[in-house]
Image: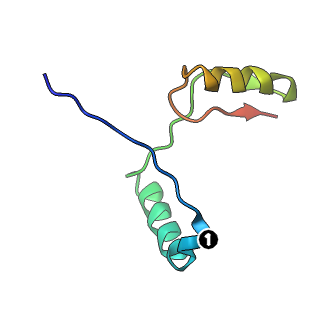
Amino acid sequence: MRWKAASVRDFLMLHYKEYMLEARDRIFYLFYTDKLKVAVAPKDFQGIESISDAVEYLLTGQNCGKVVVRF
């Protein structure tokens, strides 16, 4: 059996502002050529009153993709 590990790291964009335009263009290129897919969690949250439910759903780790609240 093989185990894989993943980590998430962050950085402050202002420290890398000279790369922002190039990075934006690369991301747009990947998105518009269907090489980058955006995943949205299938659970439906509607209206401002559902924000607390959406946050709870996010914090429990049940989501796969972005959690979206529609207005």
Q: Is residue 68 left or right of residue 29?
A: right
Q: Which colour scheme is used?
A: rainbow
Residue 37, placed above or below residue 16: above
Mark 1 burial class by Cα count in 10 Å: few <14, some 14-19, many 20+: few
**Residue wearing tag 1:** 14
Rendering quarter of residue 13: bottom right
Q: Which quadrant of the figure contains the N terminus?
A: top left
Which amino acid, by three-letter code, is at mark 1?
Answer: Leu
Q: Going 55% across and 25% down the picture, which residue do you hit? A: 63
Mark 1, secondary structure of its residue:
helix
Count of numbered marks: 1
Q: In this view, does 53 lie to the left or right of 18?
A: right
Tell which of 46 and 60 is nearer to you: 60
Q: Which quadrant of the figure contains the C terminus?
A: top right
Q: Residue furthest left?
A: 1
Position in image of residue 58 (x %, y %): 62, 26
Q: Going 68% across and 34% down the picture, which residue do you hit? A: 68
Position in image of residue 47 (x %, y %): 83, 28
Q: Going 41% across and 57% down the picture, which residue do you hit? A: 33
Position in image of residue 54 (x %, y %): 71, 25
Position in image of residue 4 (x %, y %): 25, 33
Tell which of 65 and 44 is nearer to you: 65
Q: Is residue 42 left or right of residue 30?
A: right
Q: Which residue lies furthest to the bottom in this view?
A: 18
Q: Going 74% across and 20% down the picture, which residue do you hit? A: 53
Residue 14, placed above or below residue 41: below
